[in-house]
Image (cartoon, grey):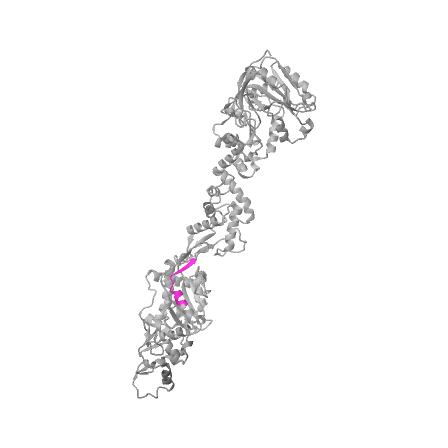
Amino acid sequence: MINDQKITISTGPSRRSVYWYPQEMLWSEFVAQLATPKVTPESFAIYKSMRKNQQDDLKDVGGFVGGRLRENRRKSDKVLDRCLITLDADNIPAGGTGAVLQAVSSLGCAYVIYSTRKHEEAAPRLRIVIPLDKPCAAEEYEPIARKISSYLDMSILDQTTFDVCRLMYWPSVSVDMGSQYVYTYADNPFLSGAGILSMYEDWHSVAEWPEIPGAIKVREQRAKRQGDPLEKKGVVGAFCRIYDVPAAMDQFLPGTYAPTDIPGRYTFTDGSTVGGAILYDGGKFIYSHHATDPISGLLCNAFDLVRLHKFSDMDDGAKEGTPAAAMPSFTAMKELCVEDPQVKALVLQEKHAEAAKDFAGIELQARGNTTEWLVKLKTNKDGVALKTIDNALIIMENDPGLSGRFYHDEFANRATVVARLPWEVSEDGPYRSRGWNDSDDAGLRHYLEKMYELTGQQKILDAMALYAKKHRRNPIKEYLAPLVWDGIQRIETLLIDYFGAADTPYTRAVLKKALVAAVARIWRPGTKFDNMPILTGPQGIGKSTFFKKLGGAWFSDSLRTFEGKEACELLQGYWIIEVGELEGFNKSEMGTIKQFLSKQDDIYRAPYGRRTEALPRGCVFFGTTNEDDFLRDRTGNRRFWPVNVDSENATKSVFTDLTPDEVDQIWAEAGILYTQGEKLYLENKEAEGAKEAQEAHKNVDPRESMILDFISKPLPSDWMRRDLQARRVFWAQGMKQEGLEERIPRDRICAAEVWCECFNNDLKYLTQRDTRDINGILMGLKVCKKFKTPTRFGAPYKQQRGFEVCL
């Protein structure tokens, strides 16, 4: 070959090769290498019937790039230079092979032409390779290739043929197509790249470059196939809705492109050509002709523009056929997107709006700037909120369907709902506040999952606890604090005015102490107050109504047990608690009530707590009864303050005169008394009145008089030495047979003695209950005082726990 010189190409064994290594050879050697195609065993008919990926694998016998590559990477921005022009003539009409060969020959320069794997006479496909006299720079390659192609019929060329890093396969044919393999070359002078470039007025201007007919239309069609980027879902669509191509250039690629005087055209500033980046569809897409541009030869939306510029190197090791959405660069770009406040906010807003369709009636705009709070959420690369406590808390603080709609009631120690929640059914009229319940727990989890894809029961509960700690309110404090007393004293005469109670220091003190205690337990929960005023009188005079009006929303008459967790639960959220029908409680239950009243704390586990805690008591108890003898504890009833009431002597009506304004003034006065340091216990005449009232309402055991009479009788001086039989004879004879013996007052008594001698029962039938009952009666007698240690009670009983008798 006369016209011959060394060329350097880059070769790889497969299209999937990551690295392409330089190979130096003579042009003549290169031409010779194309002369004999590799033959594979399948027929051409079978080859054409295969799927595209199978065809691609068969024709992939290795290939070359007509120049050198930086870092041995086959990418547009890695091309150092080109020594070969390579053209894909894939659109030759049937029978047009000869015409193409003649047109290339007329160029007068060296070339080699060979057919592709799919070539047949009915659909010719050729590869045209033209050597350059000197290697050209990457930026010079496309204008040279386009200009020389313009002397051919450019319509036969593939739209992507001018890609500077384009791969050309080495030739191969099916077993029955060897005779149709096209191979020809011309030993002419090499093409002068400089000479071709000189044909332009300014080869740097992409606007002068020849275009393949229909190229613009092809790109527009390609854009349509890609779909409107503004209509894409998720992060990609959100990014493109926030940033069109020019905006993305300014925000993420500053200085990378410069606008030209021609609207819609930009210059890639790291290249040597100008105006090669062209906008399409109003800035939704960009196509770059710049050889060294990372998006060279690609039609990109704003998302892909930034992705390829910033992260395309990450895709070098990706397997062929990997979907774009699975590329490392795609993942990195999504992460960049969700770090952008505007994109992140839009993604979350759109997810929020879509999910909100399942929760009719929710206002999507919060009271502030929705974007501002949404960007506080930590998200993954898809813009989905991470399943964290912090995110759940941010949502509760800001979501318009949740924020301000519930709070932690510090008094009731539970969440209280004050506005309709997203999962509630809408009802007419103003919303009535209510306690948070189990269905709300489920509703909140469903709402967070649906609206934010946030799940995790424990994390949601933790966030709820933190929210509750931050949003604490005490509604009774909010009620009491603004009350202003008008200076008219009411509390001391409440029982006198509304129930006709006797006007005594005790009567005046009872409600004053109790109501001030109620106020004290709001401002200082757990304040010591272990007494319970009790109104005793006929039905229908308004005893329960009185306390219900005083307590309002914080009144309860549901307390029916004074033991265990249930009792503590029944107190929560209530301030004024009526204990009704006291006559129905037996002696043991009255003892339990006394113990319950003395507590200053209740051991209880909050609804969304995981541990029990001691909750300072915030309520006060009031009793009501229709009976007189309801105090059954003989050991003392100091905690109970009974007051006899009867509406016949009342001057005011509970039903008409005790208005809400009047109740406000009662509590306002109680608040003043509290700040003045009102004592919460009875003194002097008040205390004496309490004892008299307690004694008057004491339930008397009919056996009490029998026992008192029994222990009041004098005994023989030898009483301690007598056995039980002798003692019973003494009692049976009525003390007459020994009338001359010396008699002495009794100085001791025990339950066994009463059981056997007073009640004439057998000692072996004495039970623990009987013992307690008798001891209770003895303890209630003023003449009896309990011994601190067991004492001897004579031959029948030996040592017993008993009482000293002081007659």
In percent of width and height, residue 86 lies at 59, 21
In percent of width and height, residue 733 lies at 37, 87
Left or right of 563 on screen, residue 722: left
Task: Please indicate, yes or no, whether residue 657 appears anywhere in the rendered image.
Answer: no
> In the picture, residue 512 is in which quadrant?
bottom left
**Closest to the observer: 155 or 96?**
96
Give the number of callouts: 0
Q: Examine the rendered structure and indicate whether residue 64 appears above or below residue 495.
A: above
Report the span colored magenta: 592-604
Q: Examine the rendered structure and indicate whether residue 98 appears above or below residue 483.
A: above
In percent of width and height, residue 454 lies at 50, 46
> In the picture, residue 90 is in which quadrant?
top right
The quarter in which the C terminus is drawn is bottom left
**Closest to the observer: 538 or 600?**
600
The quarter in which the N terminus is drawn is top right
Q: Is residue 633 magenta?
A: no
**Closest to the observer: 334 or 153?**
334
Q: Examine the rendered structure and indicate whether residue 290 appears above or below residue 630.
A: above
Residue at far top of view: 2
In percent of width and height, residue 772 lies at 39, 73
Left or right of 154 on screen, residue 497: left
Q: Is residue 603 magenta?
A: yes
Residue appearing at x 33%, y 68% in the figure: 682
Task: Please indicate, yes or no, whether residue 472 appears anywhere in the rendered image.
Answer: yes
